[in-house]
Protein backbone atom coordinates (compact mmCIF):
# COMPACT_ATOMS: atom_id res chain seq x y z
CA UNK A 1 0.00 0.00 0.00
CA UNK A 2 1.21 3.49 -0.84
CA UNK A 3 1.92 5.90 1.97
CA UNK A 4 -1.06 8.09 1.10
CA UNK A 5 -3.40 5.13 1.20
CA UNK A 6 -2.15 4.17 4.64
CA UNK A 7 -2.90 7.70 5.80
CA UNK A 8 -6.42 7.52 4.34
CA UNK A 9 -7.25 4.21 6.01
CA UNK A 10 -5.80 5.45 9.31
CA UNK A 11 -8.13 8.44 9.09
CA UNK A 12 -11.13 6.28 8.24
CA UNK A 13 -10.33 4.08 11.24
CA UNK A 14 -10.76 7.15 13.43
CA UNK A 15 -14.36 7.62 12.30
CA UNK A 16 -16.59 5.75 14.74
CA UNK A 17 -20.20 4.74 14.52
CA UNK A 18 -21.95 7.79 16.07
CA UNK A 19 -24.06 5.48 18.21
CA UNK A 20 -21.34 2.96 19.11
CA UNK A 21 -18.22 5.00 19.76
CA UNK A 22 -15.91 2.03 20.30
CA UNK A 23 -16.25 0.73 16.74
CA UNK A 24 -14.84 2.31 13.60
CA UNK A 25 -16.75 2.34 10.33
CA UNK A 26 -13.91 0.32 8.78
CA UNK A 27 -14.32 -2.46 11.35
CA UNK A 28 -18.07 -2.43 10.74
CA UNK A 29 -17.28 -3.29 7.13
CA UNK A 30 -18.91 -0.12 5.83
CA UNK A 31 -16.03 1.10 3.67
CA UNK A 32 -16.00 -0.72 0.35
CA UNK A 33 -13.37 1.20 -1.55
CA UNK A 34 -11.30 4.37 -1.72
CA UNK A 35 -10.27 5.87 -5.06
CA UNK A 36 -7.85 8.71 -5.66
CA UNK A 37 -8.51 10.85 -8.74
CA UNK A 38 -6.00 13.68 -8.89
CA UNK A 39 -6.93 15.98 -6.00
CA UNK A 40 -10.22 14.19 -5.27
CA UNK A 41 -10.81 11.31 -2.91
CA UNK A 42 -13.84 9.11 -3.49
CA UNK A 43 -14.92 6.99 -0.54
CA UNK A 44 -17.45 4.31 -1.44
CA UNK A 45 -19.47 3.16 1.53
CA UNK A 46 -22.16 0.57 2.19
CA UNK A 47 -25.06 1.58 4.43
CA UNK A 48 -25.94 -1.00 7.10
CA UNK A 49 -29.69 -0.42 7.33
CA UNK A 50 -31.35 1.94 4.87
CA UNK A 51 -33.38 3.97 7.30
CA UNK A 52 -30.37 4.56 9.54
CA UNK A 53 -30.36 8.26 10.50
CA UNK A 54 -26.64 8.07 11.33
CA UNK A 55 -25.62 7.87 7.66
CA UNK A 56 -25.48 11.65 7.15
CA UNK A 57 -23.46 12.07 10.33
CA UNK A 58 -21.02 9.36 9.26
CA UNK A 59 -20.62 11.03 5.87
CA UNK A 60 -19.85 14.36 7.50
CA UNK A 61 -17.39 12.79 9.95
CA UNK A 62 -15.55 11.06 7.12
CA UNK A 63 -15.20 14.38 5.29
CA UNK A 64 -13.98 16.13 8.43
CA UNK A 65 -11.41 13.45 9.22
CA UNK A 66 -10.04 13.28 5.67
CA UNK A 67 -9.85 17.09 5.49
CA UNK A 68 -7.44 17.02 8.42
CA UNK A 69 -4.93 15.24 6.16
CA UNK A 70 -4.81 18.32 3.90
CA UNK A 71 -4.05 16.13 0.88
CA UNK A 72 -7.27 16.39 -1.13
CA UNK A 73 -9.21 19.41 -2.36
CA UNK A 74 -12.40 17.42 -2.83
CA UNK A 75 -13.89 14.52 -0.93
CA UNK A 76 -16.86 12.59 -2.26
CA UNK A 77 -18.50 10.11 0.09
CA UNK A 78 -20.87 7.87 -1.85
CA UNK A 79 -23.27 5.33 -0.42
CA UNK A 80 -23.64 2.37 -2.78
CA UNK A 81 -25.84 -0.73 -2.55
CA UNK A 82 -23.72 -3.22 -4.38
CA UNK A 83 -22.38 -5.33 -2.84
CA UNK A 84 -24.98 -5.13 -0.07
CA UNK A 85 -23.68 -4.73 3.48
CA UNK A 86 -23.96 -8.00 5.40
CA UNK A 87 -23.15 -8.61 9.04
CA UNK A 88 -20.26 -10.97 8.23
CA UNK A 89 -18.35 -7.88 7.02
CA UNK A 90 -17.72 -6.86 10.66
CA UNK A 91 -14.03 -7.56 11.36
CA UNK A 92 -12.59 -9.52 14.34
CA UNK A 93 -11.51 -6.19 15.82
CA UNK A 94 -15.01 -4.85 15.23
CA UNK A 95 -16.57 -7.82 17.00
CA UNK A 96 -14.30 -7.29 20.04
CA UNK A 97 -15.03 -3.57 20.13
CA UNK A 98 -18.78 -4.13 19.94
CA UNK A 99 -18.54 -6.31 23.05
CA UNK A 100 -16.69 -3.54 24.87
CA UNK A 101 -19.75 -1.37 24.26
CA UNK A 102 -22.02 -4.09 25.65
CA UNK A 103 -23.32 -5.16 22.25
CA UNK A 104 -23.02 -8.78 21.18
CA UNK A 105 -21.49 -9.07 17.70
CA UNK A 106 -23.75 -10.36 14.91
CA UNK A 107 -24.11 -14.15 15.13
CA UNK A 108 -23.62 -16.60 12.28
CA UNK A 109 -26.69 -18.28 10.85
CA UNK A 110 -26.75 -22.05 11.02
CA UNK A 111 -27.97 -24.22 8.14
CA UNK A 112 -31.59 -23.86 9.17
CA UNK A 113 -31.29 -20.06 9.30
CA UNK A 114 -31.38 -20.12 13.12
CA UNK A 115 -29.01 -18.08 15.24
CA UNK A 116 -27.91 -17.82 18.81
CA UNK A 117 -26.21 -15.04 20.76
CA UNK A 118 -23.95 -15.32 23.81
CA UNK A 119 -23.86 -12.62 26.48
CA UNK A 120 -21.25 -9.93 25.66
CA UNK A 121 -20.57 -9.41 29.40
CA UNK A 122 -20.16 -12.91 30.86
CA UNK A 123 -20.13 -15.10 27.71
CA UNK A 124 -23.01 -17.16 29.10
CA UNK A 125 -24.98 -18.96 26.43
CA UNK A 126 -28.07 -18.87 28.66
CA UNK A 127 -29.79 -15.91 26.98
CA UNK A 128 -33.29 -15.08 25.77
CA UNK A 129 -34.47 -12.83 22.96
CA UNK A 130 -36.66 -10.04 24.32
CA UNK A 131 -37.23 -8.15 21.07
CA UNK A 132 -35.94 -8.82 17.59
CA UNK A 133 -36.03 -5.05 17.09
CA UNK A 134 -33.99 -2.70 19.24
CA UNK A 135 -33.17 0.96 19.85
CA UNK A 136 -31.61 1.23 16.39
CA UNK A 137 -32.44 -0.54 13.14
CA UNK A 138 -29.38 -2.81 13.33
CA UNK A 139 -29.87 -4.14 16.89
CA UNK A 140 -32.01 -6.59 18.87
CA UNK A 141 -32.67 -6.65 22.64
CA UNK A 142 -31.77 -9.76 24.68
CA UNK A 143 -31.50 -10.79 28.32
CA UNK A 144 -28.78 -12.86 29.97
CA UNK A 145 -30.04 -15.30 32.57
CA UNK A 146 -26.45 -15.94 33.66
CA UNK A 147 -25.43 -12.47 34.82
CA UNK A 148 -28.98 -11.07 34.78
CA UNK A 149 -28.14 -8.20 32.46
CA UNK A 150 -30.20 -6.98 29.55
CA UNK A 151 -28.03 -6.46 26.48
CA UNK A 152 -28.20 -5.71 22.79
CA UNK A 153 -26.95 -7.68 19.81
CA UNK A 154 -26.32 -6.72 16.23
CA UNK A 155 -28.85 -8.42 13.98
CA UNK A 156 -27.48 -10.95 11.55
CA UNK A 157 -28.01 -9.74 7.99
CA UNK A 158 -27.31 -12.05 5.09
CA UNK A 159 -28.18 -12.30 1.42
CA UNK A 160 -29.50 -15.79 2.20
CA UNK A 161 -32.45 -14.23 4.02
CA UNK B 1 -31.73 -8.22 -20.77
CA UNK B 2 -29.52 -6.12 -18.52
CA UNK B 3 -29.66 -2.33 -18.38
CA UNK B 4 -26.81 -1.01 -16.29
CA UNK B 5 -27.02 2.77 -16.59
CA UNK B 6 -29.40 5.72 -16.69
CA UNK B 7 -28.32 6.53 -20.25
CA UNK B 8 -29.15 3.03 -21.43
CA UNK B 9 -32.53 3.12 -19.68
CA UNK B 10 -33.38 6.36 -21.49
CA UNK B 11 -32.58 5.03 -24.93
CA UNK B 12 -36.00 3.36 -25.30
CA UNK B 13 -38.82 5.65 -24.17
CA UNK B 14 -41.20 2.72 -23.60
CA UNK B 15 -38.65 1.09 -21.29
CA UNK B 16 -38.11 4.35 -19.43
CA UNK B 17 -41.87 4.85 -18.99
CA UNK B 18 -42.42 1.33 -17.62
CA UNK B 19 -39.40 1.58 -15.31
CA UNK B 20 -40.36 4.95 -13.83
CA UNK B 21 -43.98 3.87 -13.35
CA UNK B 22 -42.82 0.83 -11.43
CA UNK B 23 -40.43 2.89 -9.30
CA UNK B 24 -43.15 5.44 -8.47
CA UNK B 25 -45.43 2.63 -7.32
CA UNK B 26 -42.73 1.05 -5.16
CA UNK B 27 -41.72 4.40 -3.66
CA UNK B 28 -45.20 5.80 -3.06
CA UNK B 29 -46.46 2.56 -1.49
CA UNK B 30 -43.60 2.38 1.01
CA UNK B 31 -43.73 6.11 1.70
CA UNK B 32 -47.37 6.22 2.77
CA UNK B 33 -47.47 2.90 4.65
CA UNK B 34 -44.37 3.96 6.59
CA UNK B 35 -46.19 7.15 7.54
CA UNK B 36 -49.33 5.33 8.64
CA UNK B 37 -47.14 3.01 10.69
CA UNK B 38 -45.26 5.88 12.29
CA UNK B 39 -48.56 7.33 13.53
CA UNK B 40 -48.62 4.44 16.00
CA UNK B 41 -45.51 5.71 17.78
CA UNK B 42 -46.33 5.85 21.49
CA UNK B 43 -49.71 4.21 20.88
CA UNK B 44 -48.72 0.62 20.03
CA UNK B 45 -50.17 -2.12 22.27
CA UNK B 46 -47.01 -2.43 24.37
CA UNK B 47 -43.53 -0.97 24.69
CA UNK B 48 -41.77 -3.80 22.84
CA UNK B 49 -44.12 -3.31 19.90
CA UNK B 50 -43.46 0.41 19.98
CA UNK B 51 -39.74 -0.28 19.57
CA UNK B 52 -40.25 -2.89 16.85
CA UNK B 53 -42.84 -1.00 14.83
CA UNK B 54 -40.82 2.22 14.77
CA UNK B 55 -37.78 0.28 13.50
CA UNK B 56 -39.91 -1.25 10.75
CA UNK B 57 -41.30 2.15 9.76
CA UNK B 58 -37.83 3.65 9.70
CA UNK B 59 -36.61 0.84 7.43
CA UNK B 60 -39.64 1.20 5.18
CA UNK B 61 -39.16 4.95 4.83
CA UNK B 62 -35.54 4.15 3.94
CA UNK B 63 -36.79 1.84 1.17
CA UNK B 64 -39.03 4.60 -0.20
CA UNK B 65 -36.03 6.95 -0.15
CA UNK B 66 -33.95 4.48 -2.18
CA UNK B 67 -36.67 4.18 -4.81
CA UNK B 68 -37.09 7.97 -4.99
CA UNK B 69 -33.32 8.22 -5.33
CA UNK B 70 -33.39 5.90 -8.34
CA UNK B 71 -36.02 8.23 -9.83
CA UNK B 72 -33.84 11.25 -9.07
CA UNK B 73 -30.93 9.60 -10.86
CA UNK B 74 -33.22 9.02 -13.84
CA UNK B 75 -33.94 12.76 -13.98
CA UNK B 76 -37.42 12.81 -12.45
CA UNK B 77 -36.58 15.53 -9.90
CA UNK B 78 -35.04 15.83 -6.46
CA UNK B 79 -35.68 13.08 -3.92
CA UNK B 80 -37.28 15.44 -1.38
CA UNK B 81 -39.54 16.93 -4.03
CA UNK B 82 -40.63 13.50 -5.25
CA UNK B 83 -41.51 12.49 -1.70
CA UNK B 84 -43.11 15.74 -0.51
CA UNK B 85 -43.81 18.05 -3.42
CA UNK B 86 -45.94 15.93 -5.78
CA UNK B 87 -49.68 16.55 -5.89
CA UNK B 88 -52.18 13.96 -4.74
CA UNK B 89 -53.27 13.08 -8.28
CA UNK B 90 -49.65 12.39 -9.26
CA UNK B 91 -49.30 9.74 -6.54
CA UNK B 92 -49.67 6.10 -7.50
CA UNK B 93 -49.76 4.36 -4.12
CA UNK B 94 -52.53 1.82 -3.56
CA UNK B 95 -55.56 3.33 -1.82
CA UNK B 96 -55.52 0.75 0.97
CA UNK B 97 -52.16 2.07 2.17
CA UNK B 98 -53.37 5.65 2.63
CA UNK B 99 -56.37 4.65 4.73
CA UNK B 100 -56.35 6.11 8.25
CA UNK B 101 -55.51 3.78 11.14
CA UNK B 102 -58.88 4.46 12.75
CA UNK B 103 -60.92 7.37 13.97
CA UNK B 104 -59.40 10.42 15.59
CA UNK B 105 -55.95 11.80 14.92
CA UNK B 106 -52.54 11.27 16.44
CA UNK B 107 -53.08 14.26 18.74
CA UNK B 108 -56.78 13.95 19.52
CA UNK B 109 -58.59 10.76 20.54
CA UNK B 110 -56.64 8.30 18.39
CA UNK B 111 -58.94 5.26 18.35
CA UNK B 112 -56.71 3.23 16.08
CA UNK B 113 -57.51 -0.33 15.08
CA UNK B 114 -54.66 -2.73 15.82
CA UNK B 115 -56.33 -5.69 14.09
CA UNK B 116 -56.65 -3.66 10.89
CA UNK B 117 -53.02 -2.56 11.19
CA UNK B 118 -51.74 -6.12 11.68
CA UNK B 119 -53.72 -7.42 8.69
CA UNK B 120 -52.84 -4.50 6.42
CA UNK B 121 -49.13 -4.69 7.29
CA UNK B 122 -48.93 -8.46 7.11
CA UNK B 123 -50.64 -8.64 3.71
CA UNK B 124 -48.64 -5.70 2.39
CA UNK B 125 -45.32 -7.06 3.66
CA UNK B 126 -45.98 -10.53 2.27
CA UNK B 127 -46.78 -9.10 -1.14
CA UNK B 128 -43.82 -6.75 -0.98
CA UNK B 129 -41.58 -9.73 -0.21
CA UNK B 130 -42.84 -11.52 -3.34
CA UNK B 131 -42.34 -8.42 -5.48
CA UNK B 132 -38.86 -7.83 -4.03
CA UNK B 133 -37.80 -11.41 -4.76
CA UNK B 134 -38.89 -10.81 -8.34
CA UNK B 135 -37.04 -7.48 -8.52
CA UNK B 136 -33.81 -9.30 -7.62
CA UNK B 137 -33.94 -10.46 -11.26
CA UNK B 138 -34.96 -7.12 -12.73
CA UNK B 139 -33.45 -6.01 -16.03
CA UNK B 140 -32.57 -2.61 -14.49
CA UNK B 141 -29.40 -3.32 -12.57
CA UNK B 142 -29.58 -0.42 -10.07
CA UNK B 143 -33.08 -1.63 -9.11
CA UNK B 144 -31.77 -5.16 -8.68
CA UNK B 145 -29.17 -3.94 -6.20
CA UNK B 146 -31.75 -2.02 -4.20
CA UNK B 147 -33.99 -5.10 -4.13
CA UNK B 148 -31.21 -7.17 -2.50
CA UNK B 149 -30.86 -4.52 0.18
CA UNK B 150 -34.61 -4.22 0.80
CA UNK B 151 -35.03 -7.97 0.89
CA UNK B 152 -32.64 -8.48 3.79
CA UNK B 153 -34.49 -5.99 5.96
CA UNK B 154 -37.86 -7.28 4.84
CA UNK B 155 -37.01 -10.69 6.28
CA UNK B 156 -37.41 -9.28 9.79
CA UNK B 157 -40.55 -7.32 8.96
CA UNK B 158 -42.30 -10.36 7.57
CA UNK B 159 -41.31 -12.49 10.55
CA UNK B 160 -42.79 -9.82 12.81
CA UNK B 161 -46.16 -9.49 11.06
CA UNK B 162 -46.56 -13.22 10.52
CA UNK B 163 -46.17 -13.71 14.27
CA UNK B 164 -48.79 -11.08 15.14
CA UNK B 165 -51.21 -12.33 12.51
CA UNK B 166 -50.95 -15.97 13.57
CA UNK B 167 -51.16 -15.28 17.28
CA UNK B 168 -54.16 -12.97 17.08
CA UNK B 169 -56.03 -15.29 14.72
CA UNK B 170 -55.48 -18.29 16.95
CA UNK B 171 -56.24 -16.48 20.21
CA UNK B 172 -59.62 -17.01 21.83
CA UNK B 173 -62.40 -14.47 22.21
CA UNK B 174 -62.44 -10.99 20.79
CA UNK B 175 -59.17 -11.22 18.84
CA UNK B 176 -60.33 -13.67 16.19
CA UNK B 177 -63.59 -11.81 15.54
CA UNK B 178 -61.74 -8.55 15.10
CA UNK B 179 -59.11 -10.13 12.86
CA UNK B 180 -61.80 -11.61 10.61
CA UNK B 181 -63.49 -8.21 10.31
CA UNK B 182 -60.13 -6.61 9.52
CA UNK B 183 -59.37 -9.20 6.83
CA UNK B 184 -62.66 -8.31 5.08
CA UNK B 185 -61.84 -4.60 5.17
CA UNK B 186 -58.30 -5.11 3.85
CA UNK B 187 -59.45 -7.42 1.04
CA UNK B 188 -61.92 -4.79 -0.22
CA UNK B 189 -58.96 -2.75 -1.42
CA UNK B 190 -56.07 -5.19 -1.58
CA UNK B 191 -56.60 -5.59 -5.34
CA UNK B 192 -55.07 -2.12 -5.63
CA UNK B 193 -51.89 -3.23 -3.88
CA UNK B 194 -51.49 -6.25 -6.17
CA UNK B 195 -52.17 -4.18 -9.29
CA UNK B 196 -49.20 -3.06 -11.39
CA UNK B 197 -51.01 -0.30 -13.26
CA UNK B 198 -51.43 0.64 -16.91
CA UNK B 199 -47.87 -0.21 -17.98
CA UNK B 200 -47.89 -3.70 -16.51
CA UNK B 201 -47.49 -5.43 -19.88
CA UNK B 202 -44.35 -3.44 -20.66
CA UNK B 203 -43.01 -3.98 -17.13
CA UNK B 204 -43.15 -7.70 -17.76
CA UNK B 205 -41.99 -7.74 -21.38
CA UNK B 206 -38.98 -5.59 -20.44
CA UNK B 207 -38.28 -8.05 -17.61
CA UNK B 208 -38.50 -5.36 -14.95
CA UNK B 209 -40.71 -7.56 -12.77
CA UNK B 210 -42.76 -10.77 -13.10
CA UNK B 211 -46.32 -10.42 -14.34
CA UNK B 212 -49.12 -9.41 -12.01
CA UNK B 213 -50.69 -12.81 -12.59
CA UNK B 214 -47.59 -14.68 -11.39
CA UNK B 215 -47.09 -12.39 -8.41
CA UNK B 216 -50.73 -12.81 -7.46
CA UNK B 217 -50.48 -16.61 -7.64
CA UNK B 218 -47.39 -16.65 -5.43
CA UNK B 219 -49.15 -14.39 -2.96
CA UNK B 220 -52.26 -16.57 -2.81
CA UNK B 221 -50.12 -19.64 -2.22
CA UNK B 222 -48.43 -18.02 0.79
CA UNK B 223 -51.75 -16.79 2.12
CA UNK B 224 -53.38 -20.19 1.78
CA UNK B 225 -50.67 -21.75 3.93
CA UNK B 226 -50.97 -19.08 6.59
CA UNK B 227 -54.76 -19.21 6.65
CA UNK B 228 -54.67 -22.95 7.18
CA UNK B 229 -52.15 -22.56 9.98
CA UNK B 230 -54.24 -19.84 11.58
CA UNK B 231 -57.40 -21.94 11.32
CA UNK B 232 -59.22 -19.57 8.97
CA UNK B 233 -61.38 -20.28 5.93
CA UNK B 234 -59.43 -19.39 2.85
CA UNK B 235 -61.31 -16.93 0.67
CA UNK B 236 -59.34 -14.24 -1.07
CA UNK B 237 -61.56 -11.94 -3.02
CA UNK B 238 -59.25 -9.01 -3.61
CA UNK B 239 -61.10 -5.92 -4.80
CA UNK B 240 -60.47 -2.27 -5.60
CA UNK B 241 -63.59 -0.91 -4.01
CA UNK B 242 -62.53 2.66 -3.48
CA UNK B 243 -60.64 3.18 -6.72
CA UNK B 244 -57.35 2.53 -8.48
CA UNK B 245 -54.45 4.36 -6.86
CA UNK B 246 -52.14 3.38 -9.74
CA UNK B 247 -54.21 5.78 -11.91
CA UNK B 248 -53.87 8.62 -9.42
CA UNK B 249 -57.27 8.02 -7.84
CA UNK B 250 -57.20 8.74 -4.11
CA UNK B 251 -59.29 9.49 -1.04
CA UNK B 252 -59.25 12.52 1.25
CA UNK B 253 -57.18 10.39 3.66
CA UNK B 254 -54.18 10.94 1.39
CA UNK B 255 -54.77 14.71 1.23
CA UNK B 256 -54.77 14.89 5.01
CA UNK B 257 -51.72 12.65 5.37
CA UNK B 258 -49.66 14.68 2.88
CA UNK B 259 -50.64 17.93 4.55
CA UNK B 260 -49.17 16.68 7.82
CA UNK B 261 -46.23 14.80 6.34
CA UNK B 262 -45.05 17.62 4.10
CA UNK B 263 -45.75 20.53 6.41
CA UNK B 264 -42.06 21.12 7.16
CA UNK B 265 -40.96 20.66 3.55
CA UNK B 266 -43.64 23.04 2.27
CA UNK B 267 -42.76 25.71 4.82
CA UNK B 268 -39.24 25.87 3.36
CA UNK B 269 -38.43 23.49 0.48
CA UNK B 270 -34.78 24.57 0.45
CA UNK B 271 -34.12 23.73 4.10
CA UNK B 272 -31.71 20.90 4.87
CA UNK B 273 -33.08 18.49 7.47
Image (spheres, rainbow, N blue to C red):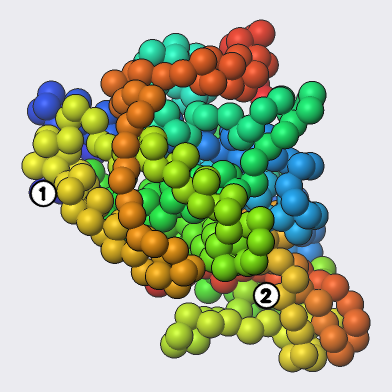
Residue identified by numbered label 2: A105
Q: Residue at x 86, y 89 (%)?
A: A146
The 10 Å Cα crowd at callout 2, few under 14, some 14 to 19, many 20 or more, is many
Element type at marker 2? Answer: loop
* Horizontal and vertical percent position of residue A104: 73, 75
Can residue B114 be seen by looking at this rendering? yes
Q: Residue at x 40, y 70 (%)?
A: B228
Indicate the quadrant containing the C terminus of chain B: top left, top right, bottom left or bottom right: top right
Left or right, B165 with respect to A84, comes to right
The answer to which of B260 and B186 lies nearer the viewer is B186
In the rendered image, the vertical position of residue B99 relative to residue B91, given as above or below: below
The image quadrant that residue A152 belongs to is bottom right
Can residue B72 be seen by looking at this rendering? no
In the drawing, what numbered circle is on residue B1? 1
In the drawing, what numbered circle is on residue B151? none
Q: CA distance from mark 2 to mark 1?
A: 40 Å
The answer to which of A36 and B242 lies nearer the viewer is B242
The answer to which of B108 and A48 lies nearer the viewer is B108
Left or right, A14 with respect to B248, comes to right
* Horizontal and vertical percent position of residue B244: 32, 25
Amino acid sequence: MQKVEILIWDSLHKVKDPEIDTVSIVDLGMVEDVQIMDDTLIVKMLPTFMGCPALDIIKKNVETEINLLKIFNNIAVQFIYHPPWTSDRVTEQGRENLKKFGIAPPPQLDEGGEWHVDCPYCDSTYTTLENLFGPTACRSILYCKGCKNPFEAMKPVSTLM
Amino acid sequence: MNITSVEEAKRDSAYYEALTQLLYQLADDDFIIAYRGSEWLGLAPHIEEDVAFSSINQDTMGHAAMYYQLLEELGEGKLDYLAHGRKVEERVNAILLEKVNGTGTYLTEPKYDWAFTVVRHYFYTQYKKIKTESLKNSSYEPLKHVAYKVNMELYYHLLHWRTWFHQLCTANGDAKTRMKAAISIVLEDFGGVVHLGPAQKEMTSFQLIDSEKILRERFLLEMKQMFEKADLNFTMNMEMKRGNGRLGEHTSDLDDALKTLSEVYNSNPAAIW
